[in-house]
Amino acid sequence: MSAEQKKTIIVVDDLPENISILIAALTPEYTVLGATSQAQLMTLLDKDIAPDLILLDIVMPDCDGYQVCCQLKSMDKTADVPIIFVTSKKETKDEKKGFEVGAVDYITKPIEPVVVKSRVKTHIDLYRNTLALKEHIHQQEVRERELLAIKEELAELASSDPLTGLKNRRCFFEGAEKEFLRFKRLSASFTVLMIDLDNFKSINDTYGHAAGDLVLKAFAELTQGLFRDYDIVARFGGEEFVILLPETNCDSAFRVAQRLRSQTAKHKITYQDYRIKLTASIGIAEVEKADVDINASIERADNAVYLAKKQGRNQVIVSH
């Protein structure tokens, strides 16, 4: 066994001869370091020595072993390190106090090497196995967090439009169907906005598809800050967008839609040396009791968009 592989024991006793006896008993299986005082012990610990076990005398001139044990248990570095008292104090009350302050075992003097070696091996093996188990649990928790992050990322990718970063059509319908069921159960009104970017085909034809993609992303950015966290803003397909506004009637939805339409018309998109002007036609439909599913509201909002286009574009129409 190489020195690097050896487990380390610190023996704390004010009598050097007792330290020598324990070193002789535990070498060469372990690396054994001696300290004749609390100060020497702390010096060893300050040198980044990580003991696997500490053999601690109770009665020493400069300190009380029980107090030293309490101090070690309060330190992060040694809180879990097993401590065995090796002492001449043989009263049951002394042994009981040793366990109460955190020791794992209690050996009385005179020292019996065979007994010490057996007790030391038992507690070091238990300590090492505990460390290994904690590390295994930690690694498992790390893997679980990584898997959860991957799962969340995949869920986000599955629910998002890759170009604009908005929700995709599938995600919209999942949320909209839940909102529709809530409406049927609680009569909690909601409104659908259908949005079509005006003259989008002309933008693609004039400036190219890269410009078209830039326009779509720019419009998606315009929606940020206009809607609540629980509103569903999604790309429906091509240059069409759809927004679901829970607990919102047509009047409130109209005001929000007008702000979006106005900001879209004011926004100038720069592509290469070109300045592209963009407008949007928006249709609004509030869910009705007669609707059999969410598609009825979407269809009415879509018809309102068609009417907005027909009447000159860049306007908001409410379905009646």
Image (cartoon, rainbow, N blue to C red):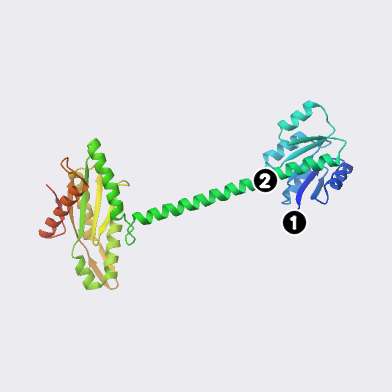
**Position in image of residue 129 (x %, y %):** 67, 45
Name the residue carrying label 2. Answer: 129
- Residue type at mark 1: give it: Glu
- The residue positioned 31% from the left and 52% from the top of the image is 171
Q: Quarter of the image containing the N terminus?
A: bottom right
Query: Please, which residue is most extreme toward the right here?
Result: 17
Between 197 and 39, the residue placed more toward the observer is 197
- Residue type at mark 2: give it: Asn
Dot 2 or dot 1: first in sequence order is 1
Secondary structure at badge 1 equals helix
Foreground disc of the pair 2, 1: 2
* Quadrant of the image occupied by residue 261: bottom left
Name the residue carrying label 1. Answer: 4
Secondary structure at badge 2 equals helix
Q: From this viewpoint, is residue 223 visible?
A: no
* Quadrant of the image occupied by residue 282: bottom left
